[in-house]
Every structure is written in structure tokens, then in C-alpha cells.
Image (cartoon, helix red, strand yellow):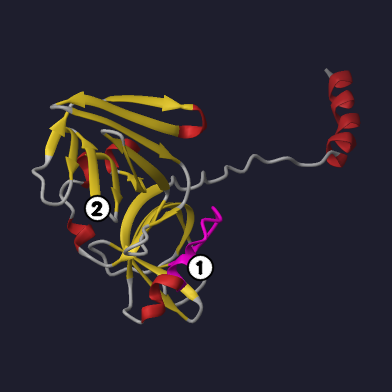
Amino acid sequence: MRVARLFLYTLLPLFAGCPHFSHKEQTPPAPELRLQGELSARDGQLLLRPCGEQRRFVVTDGGNTGIARDADELMADGRGALFVDLKGRFESSRQPDVDGQLNLSQLYRLERGGPACEDPDFEHLSLRATGSDPAWSVRIGDKGLLLERPNQAPQALPYLEEQLPGDRLNFTSEANGQHLELWVAPQSCVDGKSGARRHLSAELRLNGEVLRGCAYAGGKRDE
């Protein structure tokens, strides 16, 4: 027993010289969220006020989306805040007059303000594509594909969806005497009439006519 105690004492200096390791738990990063709100500019910064809230967050463009450039162009008319649809991660901020920071990773929509915060169909929408000159709209959601054109009754059509390489999408429909193909690609797009920004480009081929426009993913595609 005395020998064992002496052996332990001889090891004490070795233990004393070893570095001390402690396991410190790291807080996992906050999840990325998709949300909509009002985007304004102040002192060279972009501020987000989410729909239905009074809190404001500084927006940093971690995803290199070009939101600062696009917002500057849309705000050049002096009409104030914009509507924005985006995805990002909330972080803390040391600025005393804001509620935090949003690190932006994906910009879906940026446009002149409207009733978009109160859009009841957003959560049921998979994709919306629109074009101008001539105007057209395609909505894809829970109720199928809805084709809308000026001076024509809206047409609800069955469709097939195909995912293609490069995150491209193709929607086709053969019904009610219509031959429809909608091609969508992940490419930043600007509406030529309104100046609205979208994260997808779109091409509608309708009975041999080719119509171009922009598109964005709805809330259903983010599920």
C-alpha cells in the first residue's frame, strides 16, 4: 500500500505539467428563416422591419445578392421603403438603435411596396411567374396551375413538373386546347415594367408564342 502511495506521488508532478483541457459547449448558429417585410435605407445601411412588427434589423449581405445596389436603384425615385422577401439568419448587433442584424443569404423579391405582407395565398403558393409586354401570369400552388392573361378568363390547368440539372424547373400542361411550357432558371431577373427584382428568370411558351419574364418561389416550396 505504501509503495502504491509513493508511486502516485511521483506522478503528481507529471499531471501538474499537463495542459488542462475543458469542453466548452458552443451555441449552435440560429437557423435561417424566410420572411417578408419593409426595407428602408438610413445612413448608408439597409434596415428591415418584418411584416407585422416594429423591430428593425440591419441587413448585411452575406450571400452577395446585390441587394444594396438593387435597393438603391428602386429607391432613386424618392418614394421611400420597399417590400422585400428574403432568407437569412438573425444575429446580435452592437448598434444601440436597432434590434439586431440579419445576415442575408437569399433574396427572393424586392419591389415597390404594396399589400404583399397581407398576401393570403403566399403559404399555399409554390411558384409565381409574371411577364409584361404582353402581360401574363402563372401561379402554381395547392389548386394546380392558374394561367392569367389580360382580357381573358383565368384558366386552371393540370400540369407536370420536372426538375432539371442546375436547379432549373419545367412545367408542362396539355389541356383545354392549350399547350403550355414554363421554364424557370435560378438567375436574377428584373421586371422591365415595374423594376421589381426576382431570384428566378422565366420563359412561357404558350401555343407557339414565347413570352419572357421573372419568377419567385412561394412559401409552399420552402416547406
* Residue in the image at 57% along x and 44% along y: 26
Quarter placement of the N terminus = top right
Inspect the image, locate mark 2, and give the three-letter code of the amino acid beneath it: Ala
Residue 184 seen by the camera: yes
Q: Residues within 10 Å of mark 1 (few under 14, many from 20)?
A: few
Instruction: Say if 192 sits above or below 175 in the image.
Output: below
SS class, disc 1: helix
Query: Percent position (x, y) of residue 134?
Result: 26, 53
Residue that label 2 marks: 135
Query: Percent position (x, y) of residue 145?
Result: 20, 34
Q: Is residue 60 magenta?
A: yes
**In the picture, residue 173 is in which quadrant?**
top left
125 left or right of 202 in image: left
8 left or right of 120 in image: right
- Are the residues tagged 2 and 1 within 8 Å (C-beta)? no
Range drawn in magenta: 58-72
Is label 2 or label 1 in front?
2
